[in-house]
């Protein structure tokens, strides 16, 4: 009889401790998410310290499709994501598919930094299945004007003003949040 009571108590203890364990796990997960958010925000501030804040240089160019793009004009009515990347950038291989997916829902303009001549870049984009608008900054003129130090770099503009920027790996949800709150 005592073994059955022990088994019943264990089952009761498990049913009581399971919600507590789930709650403890949720608290730990939330704490780690907050820490990750703070760390990535501080890293973004440090890596973006050279990005001009006042008197922003113009961000305009001709896309590979031949369209003229001016981010100040394009961002007047809605947020625009600008993605600086390179075909040579390993992290961009993970971020570019998310940017492409975002471009189906929001205006996205990308700047290919020091990548290739136009025809090679077009073939690369086609091979990867990317549909986003791309300005080829093969000689890094835009990159130098903006003092960019890291790839990928993502900026969100609204009404011609820089709202958000981040460098390095960025997830699709992270980009979505920045677009929603711009």
Image (spheres, rainbow, N blue to C red):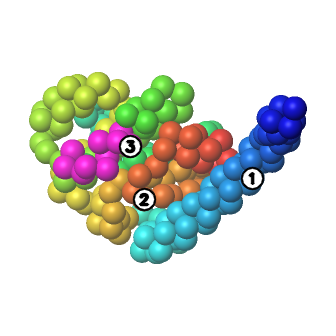
The residues tagged by marks 1 and 2 sit, at their Cα atoms, a distance apart of 33 Å
- Is 54 drawn above or below residue 81 in the view shown? below
Q: SS of the residue at dot 2?
A: strand
Residue 80 rendering spot, x and y as whole percentages: 52, 42
Nearest to N terminus: mark 3 or mark 1 = 1
Q: Is 80 or 56 nearer to us in this picture?
A: 80
Instruction: Please tell me how crowded label 3 is: few (under 14), some (14-19), or many (20+) other residues with Cα within 10 Å.
Output: some
For image coordinates 45% across by 29% down, the residue present is 101
Residue span colored magenta: 87-96
Quickly name the residue at label 2: 167
Q: Of the residues under marks 3 and 2, which one precedes in the sequence?
A: 3
Measuring from the top left, give residue 20's x and y in whole percent: 81, 47
Which residue is depicted at the point 59% across and 56% down?
Answer: 163
Q: Are marks 3 and 1 in contact (CB under 8 Å)?
A: no
Number of marks drawn: 3
Q: Which mark is residue 24?
A: 1
Q: Is residue 55 magenta?
A: no
Question: Mark 3 highlights which residue?
Answer: 95
Task: For label 1, count other residues whose C-alpha is less than 10 Å away and answer few (under 14), some (14-19) or many (20+).
Answer: few
**86 relative to 100 in the view: left or right:** left
Find out whether the residues at labels 3 and 2 contact each other: C-beta distance under 8 Å: no
Q: Is residue 57 visible?
A: yes
Q: Nearer the viewer, mark 1 or mark 2?
A: 1
Name the residue nearer the viewer: 157 or 88: 88
182, 74: nearer the viewer: 182
Choose mark 3 or mark 1, whichever is in front. Answer: 1
Secondary structure beneath label 3: helix
Within 10 Å of disc 2 (Cα), the crowding (few <14, some 14-19, many 20+) is many
């Amino acid at each position: 009889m005592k073994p059955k009571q022990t088994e019943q108590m264990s089952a009761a203890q498990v049913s009581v401790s399971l919600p507590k364990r789930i709650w403890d796990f949720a608290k730990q997960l939330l704490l780690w998410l907050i820490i990750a958010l703070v760390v990535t925000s501080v890293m973004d501030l440090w890596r973006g310290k050279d990005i001009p804040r006042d008197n922003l240089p113009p961000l305009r160019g001709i896309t590979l499709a031949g369209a003229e793009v001016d981010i100040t004009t394009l961002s007047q009515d809605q947020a625009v994501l600008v993605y600086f990347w390179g075909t040579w950038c390993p992290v961009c291989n993970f971020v570019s598919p998310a940017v492409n997916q975002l471009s189906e829902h929001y205006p996205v303009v990308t700047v290919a930094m020091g990548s290739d001549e136009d025809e090679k870049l077009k073939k690369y984009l086609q091979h990867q299945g990317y549909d986003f608008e791309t300005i080829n900054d093969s000689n890094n003129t835009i990159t130098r004007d903006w003092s960019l130090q890291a790839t990928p770099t993502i900026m969100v503009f609204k009404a011609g003003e820089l709202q958000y920027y981040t460098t390095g790996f960025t997830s699709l949800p992270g980009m979505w949040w920045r677009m929603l709150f711009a």
